[in-house]
Amino acid sequence: MDLILIFGDQLSPSISSLEGADKDKVRVLMVEVMEEATYVRHHKKKIAFLFSAMRHFAVTLRSSGWNVDYVELGDDGNTGSFIGELDRAILRHQPDRVRMTEPSEWRVRELVNSWQISTGFAVEICEDDRFICSHSEFETWVKGRKQLRMEYFYREMRKKTGLLMDAGKPVGGKWNFDADNRKSARSDLFMPKPLEIHPDPITQDVLSLVKKRFSDHFGALEPFWFATNRTGAEKARDHFIRDVLPAFGNYQDAMLAGEKFLYHSLLSFYMNVGLLDPLETCKRVEAAYYSEHAPLNAVEGFIRQVIGWREYVRGIYWLKMPDYLEQNFLETVRPLPEFYWTGQTDMACMREAIAQTREEGYAHHIQRLMITGNFALLVGVDPKAVHEWYLAVYADAFEWVELPNTLGMSQYADGGLLGSKPYAASGNYINKMSNYCENCRFDVKQKTGDQACPFNSLYWHFVDRNAEKLRTNPRMAQVYRTWEGMSRDKQKDYLDSAVKFLDEL
Ligand code: FAD
Ligand code: DLZ
Ligand code: SF4
């Protein structure tokens, strides 16, 4: 008899560990464990989402004939760890073998490896075929390349999937329509609201549990509006395609005060735990282009994020772990400022991004990259501390996708493996892409002094202190020309302003 262990982010009925298994001869094991909920102190909404989605998935499996052994967090004897629960389940069921789909995170893969070595128990690990690119395919793509640019990887994925391809050529004559996707939004635009799912009794039970056991974790538990099963996630996907996708491209980089979601899909939660299949989602999005419901820049933009970025960061993660976690190219050591947890800061852009992160366990990409990420980069926070924050506070955060985005793309801690230059920006960029500055106690137009936007002087402090490491980067050449072209006095003003701010941080 096989014991099939299904992790909390493997909630797909077609998951490879179940494939070909005889329902009468296997036991499926799913476990809620304290270790997973607390190794970083996840947002309350994230824990509730995971546990509720796991419980719903167990119901679905049982109703289609699987024998599921489900351990709830509060069950007597719950040891609180994957390994403890695996040991207990082996005593209960006396299986000949354990089977699972490969864990998505290195940490959990290592736990399983060590357990297998120490017990000598037979374990079969199946490939996670919900991803379009396998580990070996990614390694083959990497071979012989000096630079691992997402754009070239993405083209391979377009060819492989056939998405937006016409006789071997990209539809519309170009691979990438990103240049059309940089409009700033206005508050008088029609803003779609996300689809909200009312908590059913299973979710209500989980919400009570989280209220009781995780009251000291970051974030608001309610209102809780996430889908927690496949039907709900499909409704959210259809809502996105119908009402939001047509404008997804145009405003992808925009930010607006009071608008938490703009034209984003809010589908990462569901794709990352297996409630939605990424390739199927892309095919439906592609169909919206062919039926002339959505324009090419929106459809190509969405597909690029999913079969491009999402697959690419996973490839990088498995290629570079475990060393990737230790990278710190800019040698930064500052602890994460306390206001990342409280949101208490005079900087309106930071306040807004952190407040919605607390409320929803969600911020969109440009908020993560150009507000909270940019600030941490400019002030020089230890990349591991930044990584732990992102992993804890976002409901879609799993290390395979979060770590390369945070440590690589946002903090440049991998020295440019993922991005060709640091995503560092002054207040000017934030002002161009948002209306946050209108209600800020700082003045984005002032460059130095107590009233000046801190991003302005911090930007030049960042440029100056990292000159040795960044000056030779061709994409930074213009920035260094500007810096070096400034008068000594002007440079000193910037640096003094930044040092004052950093001292008070
Ligand atoms: P949309 O804007 O609607 O995009 C559509 C889909 O594209 C997303 O659902 C997602 O699956 C995919 N996608 C878009 N950008 C990326 C990207 N850079 N990497 C991988 N997939 C992408 N994404 C996560 O899923 N989990 C994380 O923990 C996470 N951490 C991040 C940390 C930082 C510092 C940054 C800069 C980005 C991070 N991202 C992460 C990527 C991106 O911000 C989120 O995928 C996106 O905001 C999710 O919201 P959405 O579903 O509304 O996305
Ligand atoms: C994120 C999470 C949390 C909070 N709790 C659990 C849990 O109790 N049981 C479980 O199987 N998975 C949980 N997860 C998701 C895991 O961290 C995820 O499955 C691993 O990343 C797999 O590598
Ligand atoms: Fe942010 Fe500066 Fe604008 Fe204030 S002025 S919102 S700190 S960019």
Image (cartoon, rainbow, N blue to C red):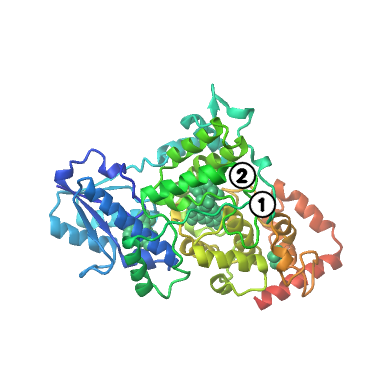
Give the left or right position of residue 119, taking residue 102 as reference.
left
Q: Position of residue 309 (x, y in %)?
A: 53, 44
Residue occupied by mark 1: 189
Q: Nearer the viewer, residue 233 or 197?
A: 197
Mark 2 surroundings: few (<14), some (14-19) or many (≥20) residues within 10 A: some
The answer to whether residue 315 shows anywhere in this view is no
- Residue at 67 percent of width and 70 percent of height: 347
- Three-letter amino acid code at disc 2? Ala
Tell me whether the residue at label 2 lies in contact with that at label 1, contact meaning CB atoms closer than 8 angstroms.
Answer: yes
- Residue at 45 percent of width and 53 percent of height: 269
Q: What number is the disc on residue 76?
A: none
* Location of residue 130 (image quadrant): top left
In this view, the mark in front (2 or 1): 1
Q: Earlier in the sequence, mark 2 or mark 1?
A: 1
Q: Position of residue 491 (x, y in %)?
A: 81, 65
Q: Nearer the viewer, residue 2 or 247?
A: 247
Q: Callout 2: helix, strand or loop?
A: helix
The answer to whether residue 130 shows anywhere in this view is yes
Distance from disc 2 to disc 1, alpha carbons, whole Å, reads 11 Å
Give the left or right position of residue 317, taking residue 10 as reference.
right
Q: Which residue lies most toward the bottom here?
A: 504
In the rendered image, the vertical position of residue 429 relative to residue 449, given as above or below: above
Q: Callout 1: helix, strand or loop?
A: loop
- Three-letter amino acid code at disc 1? Leu
In the rendered image, the vertical position of residue 500 relative to residue 318, given as above or below: below
Give the left or right position of residue 39, taking residue 79 as reference.
right
Residue occupied by mark 2: 247
Q: Quadrant of the C terminus?
A: bottom right
Q: Position of residue 83 (x, y in %)?
A: 26, 61
* Location of residue 250 (image quadrant): top right
In the rendered image, the vertical position of residue 226 relative to residue 156, given as above or below: below
